[in-house]
Image (spheres, grey):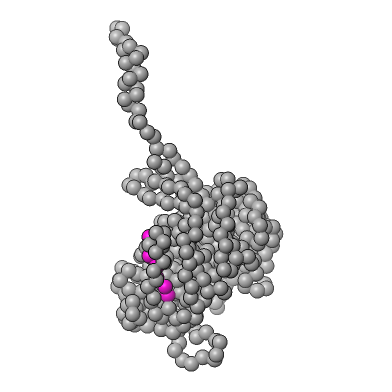
């Protein structure tokens, strides 16, 4: 049976009606922010077009942080008592089954000053910057900073010390140091942790955590490293919900001082005795799984795109992919020359960041950034930079542009 054919002109009209007048384009964009080890500069580099670069002048060398939505980059210059805020130029908004990405030029938003800024904790849509010699933390709202409003809420600590403050929305978690008199120029040791109101009034007990160092969020928990173990704050249990997770008896004598928390599942990774890392589950005993490394650990990072995986760089110049569920190192590859952990703690050594399936590793001795495929740990390319590249963060993602 022959079906009647529609005229060609009518077919064209119907096709035009079925095609929208505009179409959304999908974009993938990643920018690298690199701080120099000795120069007071931060460079922004387009990962897919490394010749596209921007440079920001600061007061001194900086440690870099990014906020949860990656729109804001924070440059902490501890020795120069200044914190600068940079706009990454990437804004990603998720809408149900898709995400929108908006691209613009990175820019300098402003800065704040204070006595020795150090730790930065992002939580509850705010940024908490601790000023070690000021005895307080400055709380800034991320959205407000991006609009140019750098108004600070000052939250007091019990005494000036090297610690941290985390904004929990209705209260603040803070490290606690001894209030006993100290020798002039000597910082008071950290002895505990607790929750406080905005005016410094305690909201519960002071919990023992000597030599407190390092903090991270994952799931409903905030963890901090202590000499006695890792202390866990259950954010669903109220201000005083703290539990000490003791190190297993068969562990070498040491402690955890640096922690990272996964975003897509509740699990943490911490350092331990230099030659091992610990996987921490805050709800299931024995809480810790120790993974020995062939050489001392220089840096490690968690994979946001694949929360099972972590990447560890060791002083022999090797990169290792660790499966945190099996606690096994799945693959290793030699990437750089050795970077000994002996010497000064501030000596320039590689640092890492992740741009989806690409790992970015600074190679200070070669003045380069190495781009590594996370699937096979093969080097994709090397990006030459000026100076001594030290810490690096990658910001970006994918989405629709309208």
Which residue is at a point 37% across and 83% down the rendered structure image?
206
Residue 203 position in % (x across, y down): 31, 79
**Highlighted magenta segment, given as a residue range:** 137-143
Can you say whether 189 is above or below 347 in the image? below
Residue 138 position in % (x across, y down): 42, 73
Q: Is residue 182 visible?
A: yes
Residue 88 position in % (x across, y down): 48, 55
Which residue is at a point 48% across and 44% down the rendered structure image?
28
Residue 69 in magenta stretch = no
Q: Using residue 73 as the reference point, say whether residue 198 is left or right of it.
A: left
Residue 240 image-quadrant placement: bottom left
Residue 138 in magenta stretch = yes
Residue 57 position in % (x across, y down): 57, 62
| Nearest to the observer: residue 188 or residue 103 | 103
Please, what is the dominant secondary structure of the magenta stretch?
strand
Q: Is residue 291 visible?
A: no
Which residue is at a point 65% across and 62% down the rendered structure image?
388
Q: Using residue 208 as the reference point, say whether residue 204 is left or right of it.
A: left
């Amino acid at each position: 049976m022959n079906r009647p054919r529609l005229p060609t002109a009518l077919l064209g009209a119907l096709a035009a009606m079925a095609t929208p007048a505009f179409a959304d384009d999908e974009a993938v964009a990643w920018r690298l922010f690199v701080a120099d080890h000795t120069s007071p500069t931060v460079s922004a580099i387009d990962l897919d077009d490394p010749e596209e670069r921007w440079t920001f002048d600061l007061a001194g060398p900086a440690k870099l942080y990014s906020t949860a939505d990656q729109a804001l980059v924070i440059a902490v210059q501890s020795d120069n008592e200044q914190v600068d805020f940079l706009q990454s130029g990437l804004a990603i908004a998720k809408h149900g089954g898709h995400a929108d990405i908006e691209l613009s030029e990175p820019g300098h938003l402003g800065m704040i000053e204070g006595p020795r800024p150090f730790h930065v904790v992002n939580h509850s849509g705010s940024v908490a910057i601790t000023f070690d010699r000021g005895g307080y933390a400055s709380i800034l709202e991320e959205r407000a900073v991006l609009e140019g409003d750098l108004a600070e809420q000052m939250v007091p600590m019990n005494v000036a010390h090297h610690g941290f403050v985390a904004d929990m929305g209705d209260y603040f978690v803070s490290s606690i140091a001894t209030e006993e008199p100290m020798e002039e120029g000597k910082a008071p040791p950290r002895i505990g942790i607790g929750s406080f109101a905005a005016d410094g009034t305690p909201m519960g007990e002071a919990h023992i955590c000597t030599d407190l160092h390092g903090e991270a969020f994952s799931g409903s928990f905030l963890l901090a490293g202590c000499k006695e173990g890792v202390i866990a704050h259950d954010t669903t249990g109220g201000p005083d919900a703290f539990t000490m997770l003791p190190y297993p008896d068969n562990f070498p004598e040491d402690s955890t001082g640096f922690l990272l928390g996964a975003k897509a599942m509740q699990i943490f990774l911490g350092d331990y005795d230099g030659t091992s890392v610990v996987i921490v589950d805050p709800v299931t005993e024995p809480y810790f799984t120790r993974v020995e490394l062939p050489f001392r650990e220089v840096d490690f990072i968690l994979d946001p795109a694949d929360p099972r995986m972590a990447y560890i760089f060791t002083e022999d110049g090797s990169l290792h992919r660790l499966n945190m569920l099996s606690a096994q190192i799945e693959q290793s590859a030699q990437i750089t020359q050795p970077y000994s952990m002996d010497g000064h703690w501030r000596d320039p050594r590689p640092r890492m960041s992740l741009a989806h399936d690409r790992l970015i590793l600074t190679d200070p001795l070669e003045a380069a950034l190495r781009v590594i495929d996370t699937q096979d740990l093969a080097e994709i390319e090397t990006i030459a930079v000026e100076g001594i590249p030290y810490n690096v963060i990658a910001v970006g993602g994918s989405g629709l542009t309208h």
